Amino acid sequence: QITLKESGPTVVKATQTLTLTCTFSGFSLSTSGVGVSWIRQPPGKALEWLALIYWDDDKRYSPSLKSRLTITKDPSKNQVVLTMTNMDPVDTATYYCARPYNSIYFDYWGQGTLVTVSS
Amino acid sequence: QSVLTQPPSVSGAPGQKITISCTGTSSNIGAGYDVHWYQQFQGTAPKLLISGTGNRPSGVPDRFSGSKSGTSASLAITGLQAEDEADYYCQSYDSGLSAWVFGGGTKLTVL
């Protein structure tokens, strides 16, 4: 059974750095072809892909947010960490981690964690 | 503004058929990348509904189907049921952006 779960602060202040952790089970980030991605959704708005990290440490970032994002992994802990610098109230959103299937679509999602950025 | 364009809302009566469009460009859908669909109920995470042009995960009824032509794709739901009321998102890959992209989402209301 594949599960993912996001954890991190529920509130951050503007200009601070956000650190979120995705803890997963049922698959391994040491396996060829496997990756974990982060996707966010502002309240009442659409989904936005943020970043993806592969088993071989290849990393991909949203072009519009690349300068603010860092994604890392710890296969031994089955965890992927996303950091986002210089947070702004417009970054208020539910942040999801998800497993990309063959780098094509996202077949398993975490429950999401709502992060509010206070000014 | 989302890279893929969807109508903000659609509605239909129980038993009817509805379609939701997803319009892209030559760097995503038009470039041959598959379109995938997700269903999201209020307050819950998105769930994969259809991958590619017709692959449904286990448990998804065959009332749901997908199609693609040119730079557009569509999700069709036949025999509409009250439980289908949700938000629907399309997703593809954009080679120009080197990014996975989503549509703006469509809210389905069952009348």
Image (cartoon, coloured by chain):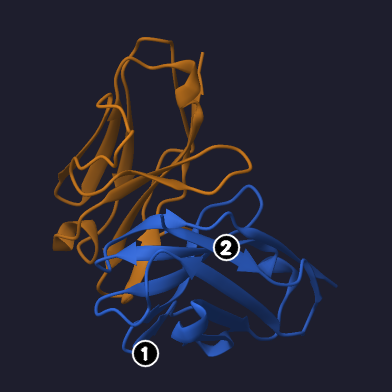
Badge 2: residue crowd in 10 Å (few <14, some 14–19, many ≥20):
some
Q: Give the foreground label among 2 and 1.
A: 2
Which residue corresponds to the image point at 28% horizontal and 24% vertical from the top-left? B63
Let me know if residue A65 appears in the view: no
**Is B74 rendered above or below residue B51?**
above
* Dot 2: element: strand
Under mark 2, the amino acid is: Lys
Q: Quadrant of residue A41?
A: bottom right
Work out whether mark 2 precedes mark 1 in sequence or the reverse, and give the earlier one. Answer: 2
Residue A5 numbered tag? 2
Residue B41 numbered tag? none
Instruction: For chain A, give the colour.
Output: blue
Is B43 positioned to the left or the right of B5 in the image?
Answer: right
Q: Residue furthest right?
A: A119
Q: Which residue is mark 1?
A: A57
Q: Position of residue B83 (x, y in %)?
A: 49, 22
Under mark 1, the amino acid is: Asp
Looking at the colours in the rendered structure, which chain would you say is drawn in orange?
A: B
